[in-house]
Structures are given as C-alpha cells and as structure tokens.
Image (cartoon, grey):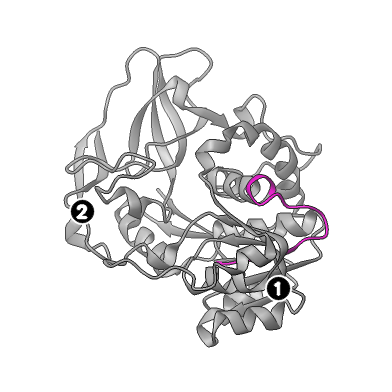
Amino acid sequence: MINREWHLLSRPVGWPKSEDFAFVESPVPTPGEGQVLVRNKYLSVDPYMRGRMSAAKSYVAPFELGKVMQGGAVGEVVESHTEGIEAGDHVLHFFGWREYAVVDAKNAVKVGPTAVPAVKVDAGTPNVPLSAYLGVLGMTGLTAYAGLLRTASFKEGDSVFVSGAAGAVGSQVGQIAKLKGASRVIGSAGSDEKVKLLVDEYGFDAAFNYKKGPVAEQLRQAAPDGIDVYFDNVGGDHLEAAVGSLNQGGRIAVCGMISVYNNTEPVPGPRNLARLIQTRGRIEGFLVGDHYDLQPQFVQEVGPWVASGALKYRETVVEGIENTLEAFLGVLRGDNIGKMVVKL
C-alpha cells in the first residue's frame, strides 16, 4: 500500500511556489502499541500554515524541510492498537497533508456518530458531516467563539465589525454575534458575491467589498454610530479603519493578518493608534491553542445551532490529495467561501 504525502523542500520567500514543495509516495506506516492508523478523508488548509513554512521564531515550530507537513484532518481508523478506538471509528487529528497517518491514541479525538459524547443535537436531527469538524465545529469554529466571546469580551448590544467575513472564521464570528444579541454586525469581503452571501445567508446587517473603495470610508457608511468590537482577520487598512471607528471602551481581537503574510518587507502599522487613548480602546492578539478549555462549552452551544441550521456555514471542497497545495494557495488568494477543505 502506498501513502501519498506533501513535503516542504524549501522555505518560500514571498508567495509560495510549487518548487518549494514535493508530492511524494511512501509506504503506508504501521501503528504500534497505543496508536491507530487513519485513512484521512478530509484535510484542512489554513492561512496560519504560511507562517509554519518560515523559519522565523513564532508560537509554533516551523515545518521541517524534507518532511511531511502537518494540519488538521479527519479520517477513518483502519487499524487500532488501543482501547476505546476501533476500526471504523472516525477521528480528528493533526496529521494532514497525507493519505494515511499513524496517530497516538491520546492525539486522536473521536467524532461523529461513534464519538462519546457526540455533538448534542435534538432527537431526529441528522448528524453533521465529518468535514464540519475541521471548520464550523473544529479549530476555526473555536477560534471564532473564543476570540469573540473571551478576547473581545463581546456583550449583548455590541456593534461588531468582522474583516475577512466570508471566510471560515469570520462568517462564524458574525453569526455568533447575531445569535447572542449584537445590535449590528458589519463584514468586509473581497467580492460582490461574498458581500451578498454575508447579508442574504449569514444575516449580517451590512457588508462591503473592500476592493471598491477605502475601507475606512466604507466602514463609516456601514456603521455610522461606530463599532464596539472589531474581529481582525486581515490587518493593514482594515485595522486602521477599525481603530478610527472604535467607540469608547471598544475592543479589537487580532486573530490574523492575511494581508501581510506574504510580504517580504515590514509594513507600516496603523497611523491612528493615538485614538485608543481617547476611546480607552484595547487591542489584544490571541491564539486558539490558549482556549481549548472552552471546547466542551463551544460544542455544547454551537453544535445544536449547526445541526438545526440556526448557524449556517459554507465549505469550499477541493477534490484529491494531489490538489492540496493549490487549495492552500487558494486560501491565500481568497478563493474560498467558508472553510477550505480537501476531500480524499
């Protein structure tokens, strides 16, 4: 049996290029005691992976050159050498970018119908698809939940602005804010199609295409009374615009800054940070890894919303492991609507 997997050959400078990677074949690994062999069914590709391709010091170790990369994945157990997980179970783990993975049992989380406990849903509600555990009920969903409710200290009645709002995290931030009583939710996106999606399907009160004019001007039009919370996925001119529209006591949660990930030179920061003195505003960065204590609460609250359709989500699905790199580059370009996943 052959295992196909993606290796990082060199550290990209600027935009990643195909020659920085290799798609290779290797024997399917054999699990040892306390391990399971998983045939991956869905792989996750996410913006943060660009940072792991660099050798720069960060919050997580870089990908090793010449070795298979990592990322979220969900798959079916085909061989088990541990109690509590059997062949046929579905598990969530962090050994993506490959077809087969050997995973220590302690790092494999059972999901779907065989999980104990599974997502709590009303009787008769269909189970959510496996791919949802990589997005709306996975790391991206928890990122939205923790960043909005804990880091940004959201409270009922807040006006919320979300950048990258049609992405996997941003779309969930806006909907959670609405479900929890936001007075107004505004989103930015990179196409008219995405803007329409935010308003018509996700229930945002307003949205704008940041490519059609200055962000600060469009934000003032969409939120004439200012904003109380900004959830930042983009950085750059979006962050500066948010500081300019921040109400007194406003909070900014910095989740990502995709606008600068491929820059080779430092970019200027917001020119209006002095306004934080006037507004007593707060900017705080966060990492989802610091908030896994919220996971049970997150699944218990958000799972029924997803199962009932109260919280909607989209996935952009790319078929075939051989297309994983292109799917990742698509995330950096903003090609995806909602979570980008690769189906094997």
Question: Residue 68 appears in which quarter of the rendering?
Answer: top left
- Whether pointer 2 and pointer 1 mark residues with C-beta atoms closer than 8 Å, the reply is no
Query: Dot 1: what SS?
Result: helix
Q: Amino acid at mark 2?
A: Arg
Give the quadrant of the N terminus.
Answer: top left
Label 2 neighbourhood size at 10 Å, few (<14), some (14-19), many (20+)?
A: some
Q: In screen coordinates, is 269 left or right of 121? A: left
Residue 82, placed above or below residue 140:
above
Q: In screen coordinates, is 343 left or right of 273? A: left
From which residue to which does the magenta span run?
Answer: 149-163
**Label 2 or label 1, whichever comes before in sequence order:** 2
Query: Residue visible at 28% across and 50% down?
Result: 53
**To which residue does mark 1 refer?**
199
Q: Is residue 152 magenta?
A: yes
**As rendered, which of 223 and 47 lies closer to the eye?**
223
What's the mark number on residue 11?
Answer: 2
Query: Residue visible at 63% across and 35% down?
Result: 295
Residue 343: x and y, percent? 43, 51
Judge depth for marks 2 and 1 and give the one in front: 2
Residue 159, placed above or below residue 284:
below
Q: Amino acid at mark 1?
A: Val
Label 1 neighbourhood size at 10 Å, few (<14), some (14-19), many (20+)?
A: some
Query: Residue visible at 50% across and 83% down?
Result: 211
Count up the numbered dots: 2
